[in-house]
Image (cartoon, rainbow, N blue to C red):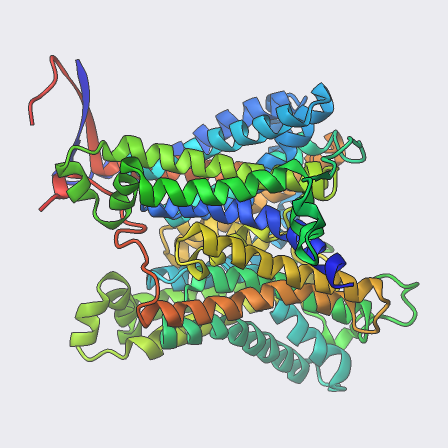
């Protein structure tokens, strides 16, 4: 019973994990991206379409990354090069994503593909309790583990990572040190967006291998809140995403057990918990736990440099 | 040769006024290509939109019917924008307003029309206000990000209404459809000219007028502006910023909640699934396009009404998903943001580059 629940937790948490990781990369460079929900949908529809056309899951994932990368470039151009309002641009991106995916996805409703299958890692998957949940999963889940580590290493063990973090803290300093502020911010937004797109592809290629209009159902917004919970750190994002995976898994379990509690009330739980978690993490942030990038949300203009 | 940008001494007034129009035109242009890719002739589609929404008296009345909730929600969102507070939750506040009004209509047993209207109006006002007030309280007390809270509460509000109409409030004679029983005549707003146009529209216009006076002619309106543009200065001047944030979000949600009242009392006469097809999200664009002015909200809400009525007919004709309208609205916002850049900066081509 516990093993099944843990397995469902990881599967339900993975799309949120990808989305949160992508959002962290955005915000580390100082750009708020409220387009996460739209980017997930773009990834989901692009991944599904490419896989359906080519028969290859890999091509699907690459297409999801690429399309979300391109859509993210709109947000990047507006917020970085044109110094536009990041909140409005992100909201516009979400609306654009919802509308575009509804338009291009309408021919794909009801189609089926062979989604990602489980691949057991010899040895590790036989570990008691956690073995099945973490090491008898599909390749995208293993990729998400790698990504968590890679992003952490990038930010804390490489020069580029340090430079990108400086962009979020104080772009003027980075500029003075010769870091190409706009180019790096642009890349952080687009690559981060691409990773969010993979989270969307996880939904349409692995979680429920089909396309449903608006299938992200608010996960992108949960991810935006989780970035604060995670204190802009990728390992904590893993923990946060699984927390929400767990709530979703438990809620689905309750429904499957035929509880008398209304399904509509149970479905509220993840959103409700996100708000609670957001309050707690905001309070912790004010007490000095973790650090919000200092220049988050502020456009940078070299002329304003002091 | 190098492109450089340079801040304008004064923003170009010509560009400032024409920017929204240019943005809409460019969005129409790009959306045309998207329609083409989706297998629809854009010129035919645009013609269809205009004919359906403005080409007849009935079409016009339908456009005004859709304009009504958009005005309420747009006013609510723009009030919060004035203070640099982001209320992304108008959608949920509409649902909560509709829920409050329906509760009164279905269960209060009031038999006087005017008392009933007043009670439904107040219930919607309070429910919408409290829903946004939660985010207001959290923001004022603990600096919790109101964008995320208001947005997530949309999902909760819609699920709450779903719970009621699939459960305790379901019409026993409704063949198991997710809707409540029809309201009695006491709980309905007046309709005009044999169309679906109802007095909610005039209430919305009146509301816009009140809000205009409030923002431009009272000390509170002034305080909201000051707190929005410079919270530090506002605090030094002795303004209670925390209380103001809560009050403004409460009012913002309350006005959006009135959209819910006008929808159930004037148009749908019951609480049902999907009672708002995203009016609350369109309201964000309206507030931004209207530059937070109450009069601007009415004008832009009408334009969006045209788009929504047209969008409905496109759905019937070419099976275009209703959500396509969102893509179009997203494009308008993108172009508007880009236009803001050209209002503030000028772009120059410099020979040989410059040395900094």
Where is residue B7? Give x, y as percent.
Answer: 16, 36
Q: Quadrant of residue B196?
A: bottom right
* Outermost residue toward the left in this view: B355
For this rendering, which residue is in front, B87 or A111?
A111
Task: Identify the residue at horizontal 71%, vertical 78% (top origin).
Answer: B103
Q: Image check: B286 left or right of B49?
A: left
Where is residue B341? Give x, y as percent.
Answer: 28, 36
Please say whether residue A233 is visible from this viewpoint.
yes
Count the labels in the image.
0
Q: Image check: B122 left or right of B112?
A: left
Q: Is residue A56 above or below residue B126?
A: above
For this rendering, which residue is in front, B193 or B345?
B345
Q: Image check: A116 left or right of B248?
A: right
Where is residue A140? Give x, y as percent.
Answer: 62, 38
Q: Is residue B27 above or below residue B219?
A: above
* Outermost residue toward the front in this view: A123
Where is residue B346? Give x, y as percent.
Answer: 20, 30
């Amino acid at each position: 019973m516990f093993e099944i629940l843990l397995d469902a937790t990881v599967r339900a948490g993975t799309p949120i994990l990808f989305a949160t990781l992508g959002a962290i990369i955005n915000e580390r460079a100082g750009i708020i991206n409220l387009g996460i929900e739209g980017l997930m949908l773009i990834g989901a529809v692009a991944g599904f379409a490419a896989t359906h056309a080519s028969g290859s899951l890999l091509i699907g994932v690459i297409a999801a990354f690429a399309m979300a990368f391109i859509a993210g470039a709109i947000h990047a151009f507006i917020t970085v090069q044109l110094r536009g309002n990041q909140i409005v641009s992100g909201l516009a991106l979400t609306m654009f994503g919802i509308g575009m995916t509804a338009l291009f996805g309408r021919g794909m409703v009801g189609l089926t593909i062979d989604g990602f299958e489980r691949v057991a890692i010899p040895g590790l998957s036989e570990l008691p309790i956690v073995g099945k949940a973490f090491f008898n999963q599909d390749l995208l889940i293993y990729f998400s583990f790698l990504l968590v580590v890679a992003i952490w290493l990038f930010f804390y063990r490489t020069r580029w990572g340090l430079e990108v973090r400086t962009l979020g803290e104080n772009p003027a300093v980075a500029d003075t040190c010769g870091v190409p502020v706009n180019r790096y911010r642009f890349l952080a937004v687009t690559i981060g967006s691409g990773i969010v797109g993979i989270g969307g592809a996880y939904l349409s290629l692995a979680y429920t291998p089909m396309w449903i209009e608006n299938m992200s159902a608010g996960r992108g917004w949960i991810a935006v809140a989780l970035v604060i919970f995670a204190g802009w750190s990728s390992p904590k994002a893993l923990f946060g995403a699984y927390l929400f995976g767990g709530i979703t898994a438990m809620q689905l379990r309750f429904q499957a057990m035929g509880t008398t509690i209304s399904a509509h009330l149970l479905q509220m739980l993840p959103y409700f918990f996100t708000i609670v978690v957001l309050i707690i993490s905001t309070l912790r942030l004010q007490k000095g736990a973790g650090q919000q990038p200092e220049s988050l949300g502020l456009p940078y203009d070299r002329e304003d440099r002091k | 040769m190098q492109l450089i940008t340079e801040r304008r001494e004064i923003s170009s007034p010509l560009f400032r006024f024409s920017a929204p129009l240019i943005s809409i035109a460019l969005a129409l242009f790009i959306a045309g290509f998207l329609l083409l890719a989706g297998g629809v002739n854009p010129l035919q589609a645009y013609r269809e939109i205009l004919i359906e929404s403005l080409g007849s008296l009935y079409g016009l009345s339908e456009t005004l019917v859709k304009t009504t909730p958009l005005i309420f929600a747009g006013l609510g969102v723009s009030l919060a924008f004035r203070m640099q507070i982001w209320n992304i939750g108008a959608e949920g506040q509409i649902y909560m307003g509709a829920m409050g009004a329906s509760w009164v209509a279905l269960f209060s047993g009031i038999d006087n029309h005017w008392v009933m209207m007043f009670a439904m109006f107040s219930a919607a006002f309070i429910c919408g206000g409290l829903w946004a007030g939660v985010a207001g309280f959290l923001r004022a007390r603990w600096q919790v990000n109101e964008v995320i809270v208001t947005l997530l509460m949309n999902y909760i509000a819609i699920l709450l209404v779903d719970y009621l109409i699939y459960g305790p409030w379901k019409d026993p004679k409704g063949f198991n459809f997710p809707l409540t029983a029809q309201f009695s005549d006491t709980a309905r707003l007046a309709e005009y000219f044999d169309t679906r146009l109802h007095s909610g529209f005039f209430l919305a216009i009146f509301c816009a007028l009140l809000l205009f006076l409030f923002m431009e002619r009272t000390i509170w309106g002034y305080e909201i502006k000051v707190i929005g543009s410079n919270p530090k200065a506002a605090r030094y001047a002795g303004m209670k910023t925390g209380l103001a944030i809560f009050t403004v979000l409460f009012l913002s949600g309350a006005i959006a909640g009135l959209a819910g009242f006008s929808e159930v009392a004037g148009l749908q006469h019951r609480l049902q699934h999907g009672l708002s097809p995203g009016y609350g999200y369109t309201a964000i664009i309206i507030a931004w396009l209207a530059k937070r002015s109450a009069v601007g909200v009415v004008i832009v809400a009408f334009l969006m009404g045209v788009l929504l009525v047209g969008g409905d007919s496109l759905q019937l004709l070419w099976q275009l998903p209703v959500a396509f309208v969102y893509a179009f609205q997203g494009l308008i916002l993108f172009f508007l943001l880009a236009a803001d850049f050209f209002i503030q900066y000028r772009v120059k081509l410099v020979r040989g580059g410059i040395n900094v």
